[in-house]
Amino acid sequence: MLWIQAFHIVSMVCWFAALFYLPRLFVYHVDATDALSKDRFQIMERRLYRGIATPSMIATIVFGIWLTTFNPEYYKSAAWLHAKLTLVVLLIGYHHICGSYVKKFAAGTMTKSGRYFRIFNELPVLALLAIVILAVVKPF
């Protein structure tokens, strides 16, 4: 069980790292003025989303589900886990929104501003804070 938990944490850290960096790339991409920079950011965004963020998200989910199989009766009644899973579902939605932005940048149809992405970039920080507190402190 400890190995599964370790892999769950490592994959979660990788997923969050990608979710922290991807919107920052969006800020730089929106602010870029030359075609070479825009092309470079487009490649970086696609590789980060497809090569790191999505596989890390899948691994996080798989290892998380695997962990619940060790004591399913406890987890069915653990209110902290239900709150955590709600945040994870919202984070999965955030992940997919990032994917739609990657596609919009690639198509040249992005209309959001750098200021929008600076604010958008803070959302996973709040999710991480809440998820870690729920998982470690188990306040309810």
Image (tube, rainbow, N blue to C red):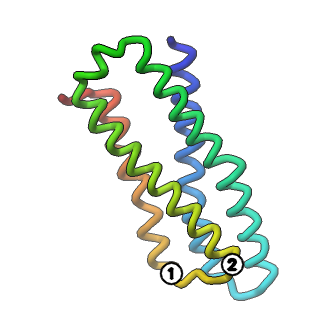
Kind of residue indicated by mark 2: Ala
Question: Could you tell whether 88 is left or right of 38 in the image?
Answer: left
Figure quadrant of residue 101: bottom right
- 110 above or below 80? below
- 118 above or below 123? below
Q: Are marks 1 and 2 in contact (CB under 8 Å)?
A: no
**Residue appearing at x 54%, y 39% in the figure:** 13
Q: Residue 112, labelled with which disc? A: 1
Q: Position of residue 25 (x, y in %)?
A: 62, 67
Nearer the observer, 116 or 88: 88
Q: Position of residue 81 (x, y in %)?
A: 30, 30
Nearer the observer, 87 or 29: 87
Nearer the observer, 27 or 39: 39
The residue singled out by tag 2 in the image is 107
Kind of residue indicated by mark 1: Lys
Crowding at mark 1 (Cα within 10 Å: few <14, some 14-19, many 20+): few
Q: Position of residue 22 (x, y in %)?
A: 59, 60
**Residue appearing at x 46%, y 20% in the figure:** 67
Q: Secondary structure at mark 2?
A: helix
Given this view, does label 1 or label 2 mark the residue nearer the observer? Answer: 2
Q: Secondary structure at mark 1?
A: loop
**Residue appearing at x 50%, y 82% in the figure:** 113
Crowding at mark 2 (Cα within 10 Å: few <14, some 14-19, many 20+): few
Q: Quadrant of the C terminus?
A: top left
**Residue appearing at x 46%, y 78% in the figure:** 115
Figure quadrant of residue 116: bottom left
Q: Residue 132, labelled with which disc? A: none
Q: Mark 1 vs mark 2: which is more N-terminal? A: 2
What is the spatial separation of the Cα atoms under label 1 and label 2, in whole angstroms?
A: 14 Å
